[in-house]
Amino acid sequence: MVILALIPAILSCLLLAAHFYRMQGFVLAGICVAAPFVLLVQRWWAVRVMQVVLALGAAEWFFTIANIYVERVQEGRPWLRMAIILGAVTLFTLGAAILFKVAPLRRRYGTPR
């Protein structure tokens, strides 16, 4: 159960890494690839680090939606499908951060309620 609850966080980090890699942000991509390895440390602070990474990732997705929206509107191109897809990715990333509140992960990392 614990491993299944970690999959969304790992996948979210990999999606962020791909996003940054595409934007030539190689350092940020590397950080996103390395971030899930902090979860190998079974301490409460590891969860907080991952939650911060995921929250910042969700903010990045939100700003990406806004930037692409502006570009597409200026060019007269459709934007709704892009907003729905990236909105879902944003919510998935936030959901991955919230999943650390489930009981098996709280027990594993010793996080307080």
Image (cartoon, helix red, strand yellow):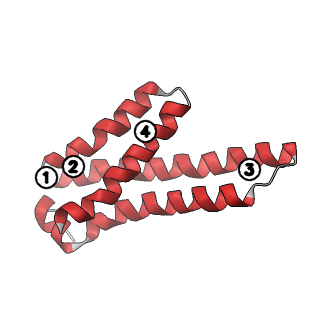
Query: CB under 8 Å between callouts 2 and 4?
Result: no
Q: CA distance from mark 2 to mark 1?
A: 6 Å
Q: The N terminus is located in which quarter?
A: bottom left
Q: Secondary structure at mark 4?
A: helix
Circle 3 residue: 69
Q: Nearer the viewer, residue 74 or 22?
A: 22
**32 relative position to 78: left or right:** left
Mark 2, Cα crowd under 10 Å, few <14 / some 14-19 / many 20+, is: some
- For residue 23, side relative to residue 34 (left or right): right
Q: CA distance from mark 1 to mark 4?
A: 24 Å
Could you tell me which residue is drawn at 31 percent across and 66 percent down?
Answer: 99
- For image coordinates 45% across by 43% down, the residue present is 16
* 51 relative to 33, above or below: below
Q: Amino acid at mark 3?
A: Tyr
Q: Nearer the viewer, mark 2 or mark 3?
A: 3
Residue type beneath disc 4: Ala
Q: Which residue is mark 4?
A: 17
Q: Earlier in the sequence, mark 4 or mark 3?
A: 4
Question: In the rendered structure, which disc, 2 or 4, sits on the residue that comes first in sequence?
Answer: 4
> What is the spatial separation of the Cα atoms under label 1 and label 3, in whole angstroms?
40 Å
Sequence-earlier tag: 2 or 3 = 2
Helix, strand or loop at mark 1: loop
Which type of secondary structure does the marked residue at label 2 adopt? helix
Percent of width and height locating residue 113: 22, 71
Question: Which of 50/79 is in front?
Answer: 79
* Left or right of residue 79: residue 53: left
The kind of residue tagged 1 is Arg
Question: Counting residues from the N terminus, which is met first, the one under dot 1 or under dot 4?
Answer: 4
Identify the residue under disc 1. 43
The residue that label 2 is drawn on is: 46
Where 111 falls versus 14 (above or below)? below
Numbered badge on residue 58 = none
